[in-house]
Amino acid sequence: MRTIVASITRWDIVWLTAIFSLHSKRLLAVAMPQISRTADGFCYPLLAMVVLAADPAAGRSFLTAAVVAFALELPAYKLLKQFVKRDRPCEILPGVDGRVKPCDQFSFPSGHTAAYIGSAVTLSIYYPSLAPLFLLIGVSGAFSRVYVAAHYPSDVAAGSLIGVLLGLGLPLAARVLVTGVTIRVSALSGVLAFLFSSGVTIVFGVFPAMRAAGLNPVEALRHE
């Protein structure tokens, strides 16, 4: 069992170091730290105001969903971080220096990714014609958190799960709370998104992260 856990942890670190080593790509070196900082919080009120101004009817529903999402997401990921207590890669991996200043101590799960993916999924539900753009931005934000060495890929997987659950569920709640807005979400797409995200997070997220928190990362890299 220890060999299996070490192998999963090893691939987590391998993928992180591979992404971190892309620093020679100038576009990534310039864009990724800036994209990573957009989830620090200041962009979300601006986003809500833009949606509210451009589409007042849907904007009220979106604002309701966004406020509830923030109220649920913040304590959820903070409790998980205190439970797992996985150190950030930039703090313990040799040769991996953080490219942005972390907001807190622990790594798992990625709260920034939860916000990116949750916002992208919610916006895609309200404006499905723009879904590819929103999802591209969300995935870019998730990728940036690994690139800046703030998180392991499994941290991002867990954050994505939180984001998907909030992004799918809260617009439906907002439809009940805010009258005059029609929001259609396919039940099949919701079930598939939940099952896929849950599977990825359990297999490559919670289990290895909890075990990896107690492993020396250098030793983990030596296991096959």
Image: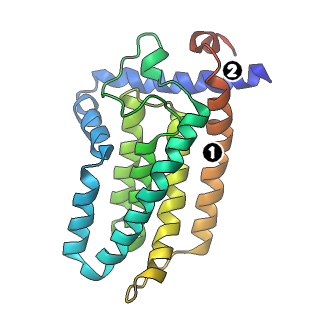
Q: Number of marks in the image?
A: 2
Crowdedness of circle 1 by 10 Å Cα count: few (<14), some, many (20+)?
some
Whether 196 is drawn above or below 65: the answer is above
Q: Position of residue 38 (x, y in %)?
A: 27, 45
The amino acid beneath tag 1 is: Val
Separation of residues labelled 2 and 1 (CA atoms) = 17 Å
The answer to which of 43 and 199 lies nearer the viewer is 43
- Quadrant of the rendered structure where residue 224 is? top right
Q: Residues within 10 Å of mark 2 (few under 14, many from 20)?
A: many
Which badge, 2 or 1, comes first in the chain's sequence?
Answer: 2
Q: What's the image's color scheme?
A: rainbow
Specify the farthest residue to the bottom.
180
Q: Could you tell me which secondary element the residue under label 2 belongs to?
A: helix
Q: Residue at x 67, y 43 (%)?
A: 202
The residue singled out by tag 1 in the image is 200
Extreme-right residue of the structure: 1
**Relative image position of residue 26 (x, y in whole percent):** 23, 27
Disc 2 marks which residue?
Answer: 6
